[in-house]
Amino acid sequence: MNEPKKKPIQKTRTPMPEQDPATRGKSFDEGPLGYSPEQARLEAGRCLQCKKPLCVAGCPVKVDIPGFLELVCRGEFAAAARLIKKTNALPAICGRVCPQEDQCEVECILGKKFEPVAVGRLERFVADYERENDLIELPEKMPPNGKKVAVVGSGPAGLTVAGDLVLLGYEVTVFEAFHKPGGVLMYGIPEFRLPKEIVEAEVDYLVRLGAKLKLNTVVGKSVTIDELLDEAGYGAVFIGVGAGLPVFMGLPGEDLGGVYSASEYLTRSNLMKAYLFPEYDTPLVRGRHVSVIGGGNVAMDSARTALRLAAESVTIVYRRSRQELPARDEEIEHAEQEGVVFRMLTAPVAFEGDQQGMVRQMKCLKMELGEPDDSGRRRPIPVEGSEFDIDTDLVILAVGSGANPLLTKGTPGLGLNSRGYINTHEHGRTDKPGVWAGGDIVTGSATVIQAMGAGKEAAEDIHRYLST
Amino acid sequence: MPEIVENTELCPDIWQIVVEAPDVAAKALPGHFVIVMADQQGERIPLTVADYDPSAGTLTLVLAVVGTSSTKLSKLEAGQQLYALLGPLGHPSEIARHGTVVMVAGGVGTAPIYPIAKAMKAAGNRVVSIQGARTAELLFWEEKLRAVSDQYIVTTDDGSRGRKGLVTEPLRELLEDDRQGAIGCVYAIGPPVMMKFCAETTRPFDIKTIVSLNTIMGDGTGMCGGCRVRVGDKTLFTCVDGPEFDGHLVDWDGVLARQRIYVAEEKCSMERYARVRDEG
Ligand SMILES: Cc1cc2nc3c(=O)[nH]c(=O)nc-3n(C[C@H](O)[C@H](O)[C@H](O)COP(=O)(O)OP(=O)(O)OC[C@H]3O[C@@H](n4cnc5c(N)ncnc54)[C@H](O)[C@@H]3O)c2cc1C
Ligand code: SF4
Ligand code: FES
C-alpha cells in the first residue's frame, strides 16, 4: 500500500506585506501590514504540532502556541485569539513588539533546518482579526468578592495584574500619572510600530471587563501607598511604574535647546502627538540633521521618528561597533532601509550651540574596542587625537534609563537596591506587607512580555494572599 | 474631569481660574504646582497653585495669556471642564521662622507669592511684600497680599501706581537698611529676568533667596528631563527637585535660553489657533 505522500515543508516563512520603505520612512502609519487570512493559514500550516513544543518553553507567559496555530489552520481565527488570551491578555500588542526571535521563534524546531514558524505575525493576525471583525467576547468573570486591589501604573505589568484580578472577582483600580493609559506602549513606542488605536482597544477591553482607571493621579503625590492601604480600603497594592528616569551624559552643552532625552522626545511625539503639530499644541524641535546617541531599540525608535518628522539626515551615533548594537536586528534593518545612517565607534564629548542657545554642533571622539567589560561586551576606548565635529541641530540621547524615585522614595518600608529599583522576593512580593511590584521598576528596562509575566505572577500571589 | 467653577479676568490678559479638584485641594500647600491640559489637543503646562480651599474642594490658578495653551484656558467658562489636571506636584515651600521675610512678586508672580506670604505670616514672621508690575492696570490681588503683609510696597515701571521703577530698588533699600540683620530670607517669584535680578540684588548681602521656576514641562514627574536646570554644579529637574531653588545658584542664562526653545513654534501655533477660531 502506498503511504499518503506528506506535503513537503515550506522552508521559508510566509512574507508579511509591508509598506514600501521609501514611503514608509515618511509616514507614521504602521509599516508592516499584517497577513491576509490565506497567508495566515499557509504560515500556520508550517507548524509540526510538536508533542513537546519548544516554542512554548521559550514563551515567558507560556502561550499554547501549537494550539492556537492549529485553530488558525482550521480558519477559526477568533477562537485562536481567545486561546492566546487565556495566558496573554494583550496579543495584538505582543504580536507586534515582542522579540520573538529571542523567545518562541528561536526555540521552534523548524528553525533547526529552515526558518521558524512566524509565531509573532500569526499572533498579531488573530488578535487583529478578532478586533476588526468585532468578535471580541468578554470571558466569564467570578462573582464580585468585595475586595479591592490598587494597581499603580498602567503599563503592561499593571494592565496584566488588573485583567487577571478583575476576572477573579476583585474590584481593581489602576492609578496612572498620565492622561492616557498604556505606559511605554502609549508614550514610548511610536505609532508606526504600534498604533495607539490598538493600545486603546486593549485597555478598553480591560475596562469593559470591569477594571477602573484613575488617570492624572501620581501615586506618591496625589495619594500615597499607605493611604491606599490604610484609608482607602485596598487590600493589596501592585507597583508597576516602569523605569521612567531619563539618563543624561553630563556633557558640556547638554542643556542646549534641541538636545532631548529620548523619553522626552518620544513622549512629545507619541503621547502628546507633536508629530501632528500645530493641530496638536505640543511643539518639538524638528531638526534637519539629527543625531541619536545610543544603539538600543529606543535609539532606533527615536531615529525613525525623527526621519518621519522630515529630517534630511538622521545618524545613529554609537560608541561600540555594529556587532554590539543592542537593538533587535529587525529594528536595525528597518532603520537602515528607511535611510538612517549608522556611525559606529563614535562618542560625543560636547555639544555647541548658537546665540539663541540651540544646539548646532557635536564634538566627537573616535573609539576602538578593548577588553570585554562586566557586561561581556568589548569596552570602547577613545582614540587619542581623533576629535572631530558633526553638524547637528537635534540631538536625542538614548543612552538608557534609570529608576524614577518619585514613588519609591515616598513609600516607607519599600526595600530598594543600590540603583533604586524595588527589591522583590518570590512572586513579586516587596519588603512592604501587602505590596507587590513588577516590570521595569524591578528589573530595569526589559520587555513588554517580561513585565506582563511579572504581573501575572504577582496577580496569582495577590489572589492567594487575599483569599486566606 | 475637573470642572471650572469660575474664570475671571483679573486685569488685561491675566485670568483667575477656580477649578473643582477636591483631591488636589486637600493636599495642596504653598509652593506646589499642578499640570493642566485645556483640551485633548492641548499641551501639558505647569501652573503654580495660587490658592486652595480644601473645604470647598477648589484650587485657584492664575495665568497670563501668552500663547495657545493659556489662551485656550482663558476661554474656558464656568461649567466647562479641563481635559486634565495633575497634582499637587513639586516640593512645597519651606515655611519656617526667619524673623523678617521679604516677598517679591513680579507680574503674575503675585499669585504664587500670596499663599507663601500668608503661610509665612501665620508662622510668625514679619512679612514685607514688594509687588511690581509694568503699569497700574496690571496689578491684581493687591488687597489680598497687603492683608497678609506687615509692610507692603508697590512699584510700577511707569510710575502709574506706587514707586516708579523696578522691584529690585526697594529690595536693595530694605537690605541696606536692615542693620540688625532681621531679614532671614527673600522670596522672588515672577518672570525669570526679574528673579535673576532679585537674586543679583541679594547676593552681596548673602541672604538666602528662593525663586520658583516655571520651566517648560512635560510629565511633571521626573520622567522626561525637559524641565532640567543647572543649580550650582548639578543638573536638577524643576518638577521634582523644585520648583523652588536657591536663586544664587540657578544658572539664569540657561533658564532664559531654555525658555526660548519653542518661540517659533509658539508663534505658528498661535497663528493657527487664531485662524481656526476665526473660521469658527
Ligand atoms: C521607546 C521604547 C521602545 C520599546 N520597545 C519595546 C519593544 O519593541 N518590545 C518590548 O518588548 N519592549 C519594548 N520596550 C520596553 C517595554 O516597553 C518595557 O519593558 C515595558 O513597557 C515595561 O512595562 P511596565 O509595566 O513595567 O512599565 P511602563 O510601561 O513603563 O508603565 C509604567 C506606567 O506607570 C506610570 N507611572 C509611573 N510612576 C507613577 C506614579 N507614581 N503614579 C502613577 N503612575 C505612575 C507611568 O506613567 C507609566 O504609564 C521599549 C521601551 C521603550 C522606552
Ligand atoms: S516548536 Fe515550532 S513547529 Fe513545534 S509546535 Fe512550536 S511553532 Fe510548531
Ligand atoms: S517635566 Fe519631565 S522631568 Fe520634569
Image (tube, coloured by chain):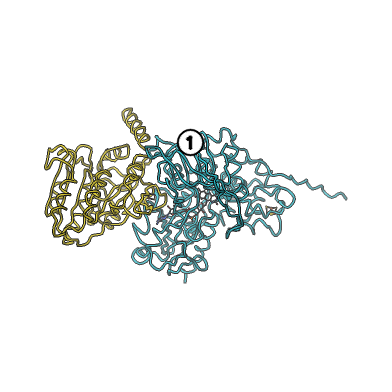
Chain colours: A cyan, B yellow
User: Where residue B135 appears, x then y in whole percent?
Assistant: 16, 38
Picture quadrant of residue A21: top right
Picture quadrant of residue B178: bottom left
Determine whether, in the image, residue A20 is placed left or right of residue A435: right
User: Where residue A456 appears, x then y in whole percent?
Assistant: 52, 60
Q: Which residue is mark 1?
A: A309
Q: What is the secondary structure assignment of the residue under circle 1?
A: loop
Determine whether, in the image, residue A356 is placed left or right of residue B116: right
Q: Chain of mark 1?
A: A
Can residue A300 be seen at all in this image of the molecule?
A: no
Q: Nearer the viewer, residue B115 or B162?
A: B162
Q: Is residue A347 above or below residue A222?
A: above
Determine whether, in the image, residue A342 is placed left or right of residue B18: right
Q: Nearer the viewer, residue A193 or A251?
A: A251
Q: Kindly give the residue lying farthest to the front in the view shown.
A: A385
Q: Give amino acid for label 1.
A: Leu
Determine whether, in the image, residue A361 is placed left or right of residue A322: left
User: Where residue A415 appears, x then y in whole percent?
Assistant: 44, 67
Q: Is residue B80 above or below residue A166?
A: above
Q: Kindly give the residue lying farthest to the right in the view shown.
A: A1
User: Where residue B168 appears, x then y in whole percent?
Assistant: 19, 46
Can residue A438 be seen at all in this image of the molecule?
A: yes
